Amino acid sequence: MRKSHKIAILGTGFIADFYTATLHSQRTLDRVHTVYSRSIDKGNRFKEKWSISNCTNNMHTAIHDNDIDTVIIGLPNHLHKDAVLAAAEAGKSILCTKPLGRTSKEALEMLDAVEKQGVFNGYLEDLVYPPKTLKAIHSVNDGSIGKVMWARSRETHPGPHSDWFWDNDLAGGGAIIDMGCHCVEIIRNFIGKGIRPVEAMCWSDTLVHPIEGEDHGIGLIRFENGAIGQFEVSWAFRGGMDLRDEISGTEGTIWLNHWLRTGFEMFTSGSKGGYVAEKAEGDSGWLFPVGDEAAELGYTHMFNDMFEAMDNEEEPMETFYDGYIVNTIIDACYKSAQTKQWEPINISLWRGEENVSHLRDTKEIDGHILIKTEVMPDGTTKQILKDPETGKISERYI
């Protein structure tokens, strides 16, 4: 049964704009009733822009408003925990932006709080919700590409839009905590959330910006079944925002390109100024506008999933538990970047599968192990075989 929800949104930044625009334009049942901002001036401007009833610079007041049933947290990373703990104690449904915490310790505290209070919790990882990604996940789950061996996710752009992102203490890191959290959860959705991530290897460096955190990072994540996840992130990529995913299976491959090549390409020699798309670096020359940013970034399907699950008293696709697992992986990546070696992913609360077998299968033909079958240019079929006793490799035509 569909219900209407009155929402308190905490924050008035870029992400809060996207969230509110999406909420007010889709189900029509869910409205932001109260906005909290640390700056009352910003809060009032946000209130007027989105025709919101109430504005406050007191977070406690926003959360404890009796008319509010749902709290959406769109605050800087260092404020997530206090907001979640307060909203959980107040018995509100809670949706929190990514990353859940700056560390897995923070994330686990938040997970414990919502589960102890028994409140609905949703992890707002929008980039697993774009229509193309949802279709790809469905195809993988249907077995269309066989067993996933390798999943790669890339997010790069010229850098974030607010000052706190660039502060290592407030954000919890640099490009890896900011964008790597997106990539890690995309990878988990393709390889399988029930498959335990066991260790990580990561490189990071600050190549361009005069900051303490990293502006580049590349990570590898090994899963218990042998699958590998790979992410690439950068705060110094020029040319806009690049969002790409690649999934390699035993029976097929999926490529996803979300942003720079959208199918909408336009050239203009005269700039009129204005916004083109998130992280676009210019408004003349070749441009790649996005028809519906909220949908293409996953916000539309994400909030539909969250509120439909809330209404039906079910778990959404992404919960605080997922946010916690992401943080454990990011923790291992940061440690690996320092030690320059593989580091274990320490998950104190694992709810997935146990003792998962390796994804590699063997097929025997006439006492030999089949390595590969291939149709040759002349139309004949060749098999590459291995003798299980001697290890000798041979070939035959069939």
Image (cartoon, helix red, strand yellow):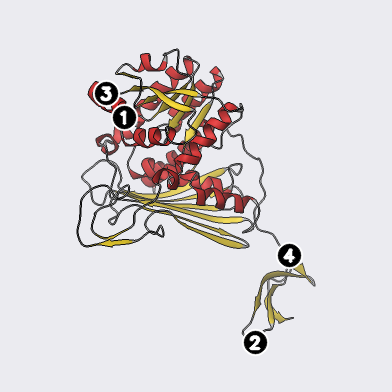
Mark found first going from the N terminus, 2 or 4: 4
Q: Amino acid at mark 4?
A: Lys
Residues under numbered marks 3 and 4 in contact, where contact means CB atoms less than 8 Å apart: no
Number of residues whose C-alpha sits closer than 10 Å to that of mark 4, classed few (under 14), some (14–19) or many (20 or more):
few
Q: CA distance from mark 2 to mark 4?
A: 26 Å
Number of residues whose C-alpha sits closer than 10 Å to that of mark 2, classed few (under 14), some (14–19) or many (20 or more):
few
Q: Nearer the viewer, mark 3 or mark 2?
A: 3
From the viewer's perspective, is residue 364 above or below residue 224? below
Q: Amino acid at mark 3?
A: Asn
Q: CA distance from mark 2 to mark 1?
A: 65 Å
Q: Residue at x 19, y 59 (%)?
A: 270
From the viewer's perspective, is residue 32 above or below residue 25? above
Q: Which residue matches tag 3?
A: 44
Q: Which residue matches tag 2?
A: 378
Q: Amino acid at mark 1?
A: Thr
Mark found first going from the N terminus, 2 or 1: 1
Q: Nearer the viewer, mark 1 or mark 4?
A: 1
Where residue 277 appears, as percent x and y from the top left, is 32, 49
Q: Which residue matches tag 1?
A: 12
Q: CA distance from mark 3 to mark 2?
A: 73 Å
Element type at mark 4: loop
